[in-house]
Image: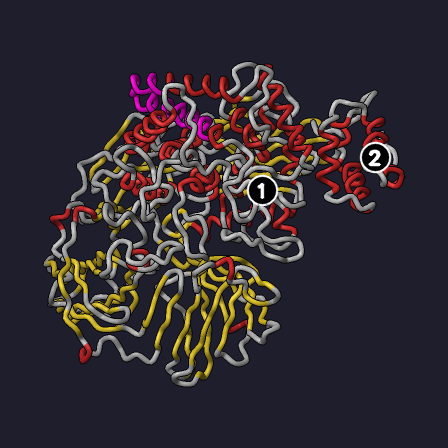
Amino acid sequence: MVDAPAGLRFEHQPAPVLGIGTPAPRLSWHVPAAEPGFRQRAYEVEAGGRRFVVESAEQVLVPWPGEPLVSRERVEVRVRVLGADWSPWSEPAVVEAGLLSAADWSATMIGADTRHAPVMTGRLTVPGEVRTARLRITAHGLCVPWVNGRRAGDHVLAPGWTSYHHRLRYHTHDVTDLVRAGDNVVEVLLGNGWFRGRLGWRGERAHYGDRLGLLAQLEVTTVDGATHVLATDRAWTATESGVLADDLYDGQRTDLRHRSTVDTSADVPVVELDTDLTRLVAPDGPPVRVTGTVPAVGVSTSPSGATIVDFGQNLVGWVRLRSRAGTEGAEVTVRHAEVLDGGELAVGPLRGAKATDSYLLAGGDELLEPALTCHGFRYAEVTGVPGLRAGDVTAAVVGTDLERAGWFECSNPLLNRFHENVVWSARGNFVDVPTDCPQRDERFGWTGDAQIFAPTAAFLFDSAGFLTSWLADLSADQRADGSVPWVVPDVFPWPTPGAAAWSDAAVLVPRVLHQRTGDLGLLRRQLPGMCAWVDHAAALAGEDRVWSGGFQFGDWLDPSAPPDDPFAALTDPDLVATAYLARSAGALAEVAGLLGETALAARYDELADEVRAAFTREFVTESGRVLGETPTAYALAITGDLLPTAGQRRRAGERLADLVRAAGFRTATGFVGTPLVTDALCATGHSDVAYRLLTQTGCPSWLYPVTVGATTVWERWDALAPDGSINPGAMTSFNHYALGAVADWLHRSVAGLAPAAPGYRELLVRPLPGPALTHASASHRTPYGMASVTWRRAGGRLTLRVTVPVGAGATVHVPGRVDPERVAHGEHTWEVPDPVVARTAPDEPTVRDLLDHEPFWRRVVEAATEVGIADGERRVAGRLARHLDEPAARLVDSITMGFAPHAEELRRRIGDFPY
């Protein structure tokens, strides 16, 4: 038997889809269960009463089978599949087209001159019973619509942030239940948002324009088939709302005493604004919503006497506050911050952002919350509410409403909390665009951050539509010479030069989305921009193919960089740039081949080979040492296939492992190296070192923030010192997902669940059990259904369980076995001897063995600290790193001699090597 198909999707959106922007949306579905041996031979689609049979095994992003949709057309779709017999039909799924042409709009954009946030009002008389009603709406700024006094939809910060000069997103709301026969009133509150509010740390405002605008069209169909339209025009009116000021950085100030906006006595006329309706686009992914709430975990009094609310979780959104029996005209103020400093709000990391909401009360019992701003915070300082209780305060969590798609869990609670921190940082920074941080006066769509985090994002969330929309803005803002801005949408006041790893998002993010979703159409759409960027970078590199000079971020925020100079990384920026040029050229060659562009594929293959050869010539010695001797340099060379001989690769892997050991297994990589270093170690046979690096808890490390209470990923490895002091650098965010990109390695390697073909049609299961963990698991809702891998070590045995969804297959590398196994859909279990065995002592243990012996290594470090050796761990590790292949027993004696006058006491405290 075969289950009925389920989870119908149109493009990257789950059904029902209202207002889709393409006339021929591709279809996807999954089959929940099928008998062993099932193979789909054909599928049948019923759309709008017509049936189409297609002989194909495809079930992801298959072509629309019938005539293209026309604007406003609503179609009910169902699917069944054929194996030995036909499956049952899926449940019907609805897709409805939006307005597919500018000519479908009768509305014009309107604005008004008001001191405070305006409310635009239109009226429509409906002569009969309502059958359907749709409100299509967008704005220059933010818009909050009501119909007959009731909220239309649940979107917040709508219509979101796009490259407004090129793309203006509109949303379609089903307001059938809000519209009635007779008189109807539509009111829309407008706010500054990204369009007219502050953008950037220089105080710039009105980047896109100095006038707010509303474009709205209410279309009502009555039971007699007639259509009645209320479109924005000069017949609308405007009035000032009670929102006295609003800004995404600074917050919202609201006078709750303001009279009802339906009162026409204060109306002001509106003006029609010139606008290009061809810019209008329908959404590719979900909107921003309130996605959850977090209750306060405590209310306390700070040393200064302020009331501080702790939500126990760093998040993005706003505070919902119940003011009981407030006095008319009294003021309530809510200030926000991510951390405390001496018991008070730490507002320094906010830089110029005020992050303050305030309310003038109308009197009585009131629920206070903003609508035109959001903040990044864990703590809130509340004034004006005597006797505030924890039960009176809740945090509303705000972000793009992405469905969770991937999970990871293991036996180490610190790693589990770290992974949860990665999830929270993604939730907080995916607010219509993938931003760097959600709290200070920045919040830009930095391309470098998105590029390195895209694989993790694609696993954790159904993020394809979200990132597809962002890539459309990247293409819109890409310059004529092919350079790609540092941030998308591009809001810098000057043209920024292309930069390696940042601008490479143009190539690498689409490639990741294809790998994870199978979307060839996205690759075809982005191909011209991919080529333009690689051509631009190749021109900058010149004929010798070494990209040198010019501006580069390099290995941004390398932990060795001082607080005031994040550029001061140890890895040569020219090395980073050349390695990324090779990476992107190779990826582009692969993409061109997938699209059947054979000439392009050959051209970029040749370019990639030339750059790889140039990298080796310029930065790699014959023996395999890489210029600069940094973990990032080695990680780039190893993962980028930039070492042409096996000997060079082996030596580079050994040297990388040595560097990690010499650093005491503390991280020594910035934004570029961090996602790559564990993969590079594993690829060269040093998974034990990768595990030690992963599980280090000293600063800097992935787990150090967890040990001091972090609930999101930090921008800097040392954003908060163990003594609670805050890094003094101007960039110190406590919610910044970039360094959490290692979570992709947790999913793919530690748990062992990775795509081996686009869209996970083939799975690669290759778990990496290590002595630091007794179990690990990952599960992901692939386009074909749920896939999972779980391994557990107990009693000298390892049990591996794998779930493969219908329509997919898997190659499984069972730990301890030489040959992989090929399996089809279903549940599979193996039990084998535990390959993770206690290390036995060699006849002559070396210093490497000492470093890999965690208890003894800790004993050495503690002894060095106890006898007063300054910076003991680093100095001892550095000394050991110069003698890695020497006998460990002798070094216990010789190492102490280098630390006179502490030698004798140090030797006594260390004791004997434990073999």
Q: Is residue 592 magenta?
A: yes
Q: Is residue 573 magenta?
A: no
Q: Residue at x 44, y 51 (%)?
A: 429
Q: Amino acid at mark 1?
A: Pro
Q: Which residues are magenta?
A: 577-605
Q: Residue at x 15, y 59 (%)?
A: 273
Tell which of 205 and 739 is nearer to you: 205
- Disc 1 crowd, CA 10 A, few/some/many (<14, 14-19, 20+): many
Q: Which residue is mark 1?
A: 559
- As helix, strand or loop, the secondary structure at mark 2 comes to helix
Q: Which residue appears farthest toward the bottom when viewing the image?
A: 327
For the C terminus, the image quarter is top right
Please state the total of marks drawn on the protein image: 2
Residue 696 coordinates in the image, percent (x, y) = 67, 41
In the depicted structure, whether residue 831 falls above or below residue 304: above
Query: Does label 2 or label 1 sit earlier along the sequence?
Result: 1
Q: Residue at x 20, y 40 (%)?
A: 23
- As helix, strand or loop, the secondary structure at mark 1 comes to loop
Residue 893 located left or right of residue 497: right
Q: Quadrant of residue 533?
A: top left
Q: Residue at x 51, y 60 (%)?
A: 348
Q: Amino acid at mark 2?
A: Thr
* Real-space Cα separation, disc 2 to disc 1, in angstroms: 28 Å
Q: Which mark is residue 489?
A: none
Residue 222 seen anywhere in this rendered image of the structure: no
Q: Which residue is mark 2?
A: 896
